[in-house]
Image (cartoon, rainbow, N blue to C red):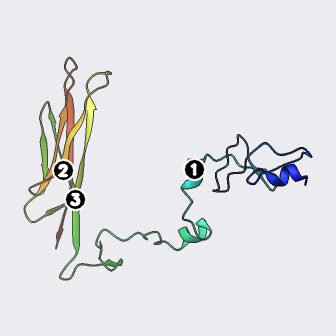
Amino acid sequence: MSSTAQSKVGYLAIGTSNAPTIPLNVSGTANMTTLSIGGTAVTATGAQLNYVAGVTSAIQTQLNAKEPTISAGTTAQYWRGDKTWQVPAGGTLSCTTVTASATNAGVTATCATGYVVTGGGCYTLQNTTNDGDYTEYNYPSGNGWYCARIMVTGLNALNVTAYAQCCKIQ
């Protein structure tokens, strides 16, 4: 290295015998348009690489150590807090789905006496091909599931159906 190159502390000469003119940022920042490591082009963006900044071992190894897939139970079982399928003490679990529908109104699918709501949801059917209507309310209510929709002015009525999953121990 020439005495001129040696006097330029913080500069790096690459592939040249002339004095370097490109500074090397010793803080670790590099500005480049392409990067190849060991002959393999790196195509990820800086933001994408930052997602794995805290990874300390192989990602697949970490994923394999996570909770396993839950095996299927039967309709007579429930998933207990200790992560096992159990038959309810004192009887068999019986579940059914109830539905209720309305046009231009909210609606509640209500579980029959003796059953409790364990889940539910909504679906809508628009009477036109226009877009813009959507389900606004979708939540458990009392012993059932409530749904309502929003209708954009000028469109035809929107049908909304609530469904509730209702269970009891027999």
Front residue of 66/36: it is 36
Front residue of 144/90: it is 144
Picture disc at residue 48: 1
Label whose residue precedes the other's in the sequence (1 or 3): 1
Q: Position of residue 114 (x, y in %)?
A: 9, 66
Q: Nearer the viewer, mark 1 or mark 2?
A: 1
Q: Residues within 10 Å of mark 3 (few under 14, many from 20)?
A: few
Q: Secondary structure at mark 3?
A: strand
Q: Nearer the viewer, mark 1 or mark 3?
A: 1
Q: Position of residue 139 (x, y in %)?
A: 18, 50
Q: Identify the residue under disc 3.
A: 96
Q: Secondary structure at mark 2?
A: strand
Q: Residue at x 86, y 45 (%)?
A: 19
- Name the amino acid type tagged 1: Gln
Indicate left or right for 151 with 77 as reference. left
- Name the amino acid type tagged 2: Tyr
Front residue of 156/58: it is 58
